[in-house]
Image: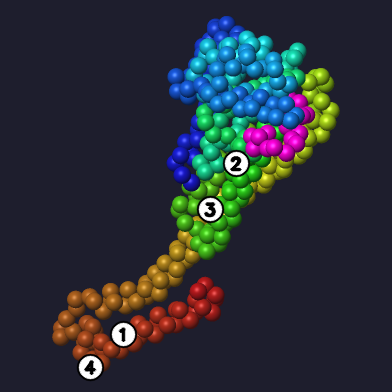
Amino acid sequence: MAKAETASLHVARSARRVPAGASPGTLIADPAAHRSELRLTLMSPDKVETIANASIDDLTVHCEKWPLIWLDCVGLANIALIEEIGRIFDLHPLALEDVVNTGQRPKVDFFEDHAFVVISMIDDVATNRYEQVSVFFGKKFVITFQEREGDPFDPVRKRIASTAPSRLRSRGADYLAYALIDAVVDSYFPAVDASSDIIDRVEDDMMRGPQKQQMQQLHQLRRRTGVLKGALWPLRDALATLIRSDAAYVKAETKIFLNDTLDHALRLIEQVETQRDMTTGLIEMHLSLSQARTNEVISLLTIVSAIFIPLTFLVGVWGMNFDPASSPWNMPELHSRYGYPAALVFMAAIAFGLISFFKWKKWL
């Protein structure tokens, strides 16, 4: 697993907080925040217009003329711009505070004329880089705030820009908000499937023989599934809250589609739970296989030692410095013509006998 991915897992768990004692709704930019840019999409059932690098003036000029708008703010460095957007659309200041203080738990808040949704999304599937996306929607508008460039919204943009009739342009802001949330949820599937492939590959490699690097891979996978679980469980609760809502700007027909997105989230949670159980089981299996391999090595070394113990004893006895000339009892074998080959044959017979005995006992 790449170092960039490991770093992204730590970033996903970090959260900035307003200094203690600050007034509620205080917006403080992160020094590392990306420069803010606006993309304004103006929609009606039969046409669409997109303004890249839009300004506040574009909002004031065009918003009242179109039945549905989508304002996408990428980068959270410009606090004055975010505050002005909040003023124009009458967004709650506490919600705007959660927008700039990234690392919030996925949730849904309902206000008088708009809803506020916070979710975590994967903006780079290759490295599993997470970021917070905040979604406001009311009767005629959808506003998204992203930390940086990169999102899973391109399929939604293509459907909006299509010349064919599109439900995204005709069903209202709540349906557009659903489509964006659904795109975020679906973006988790490639990451979850990639984790499954890695787990299967590691399992196959382990069956051929456990290696040291596999344990590191498994711990990284378990951490990765933990991050996914931390993002998906509260997302499930947020979707359920949206479905149960009685707000007038969340229509009943949109709740049917949101329920389908909830099903996707539940499926992802089940997969992640299964992966976490599998990684835990593989870690335990790796330890067991490593221990079994160590036991096999120790058993082999023990058997080898048992074979050489009597041979070492004989060599030690015959290696003592006694003079056979001083007494017939002092190493008489040294004067034997075939003493050396006889000793080797005798020791070989002992070794062969021990090996045969170990095989008979099924220790080898």
- The amino acid type found where label 2 is placed reads Thr
Residue denoted by label 2? 225
Q: Quadrant of residue 223?
A: top right
Which one is in front in this view, the residue at disc 2 or the one at disc 3?
Answer: 2
- Lower position in the chain sequence, tag 3 or tag 1: 3
Q: Residue 287 carries which label?
A: 3
Left or right, 89 with respect to 123, comes to right
Would you call the spot at circle 1 few (<14 residues within 10 Å), some (14-19), or many (20 or more)?
few
Q: Horizontal and vertical percent for residue 353?
A: 44, 82
Whether the residues at callouts 4 and 2 have beta carbons within 8 Å, the answer is: no
- Lower position in the chain sequence, tag 2 or tag 1: 2
Tell me what residue is drawn at x 41 percent, y 71 percent. Answer: 304
Q: What stretch is highlighted in magenta?
A: 156-176
Left or right, 133 with respect to 344, comes to right
- Could you tell me if residue 142 is visible in this image? no
Would you call the spot at circle 2 few (<14 residues within 10 Å), some (14-19), or many (20 or more)?
many
Whether the residues at callouts 3 and 1 have beta carbons within 8 Å, the answer is: no
Find numbered disc 4 in the image and state the secondary structure of the residue it sits on.
loop
Q: Horizontal and vertical percent for residue 46?
A: 74, 30
Which one is in front in this view, the residue at disc 4 or the one at disc 1?
Answer: 1
Vertical side of 88 occupied by 169: above or below = below
Chief SS of the magenta region: helix
Residue denoted by label 1? 344
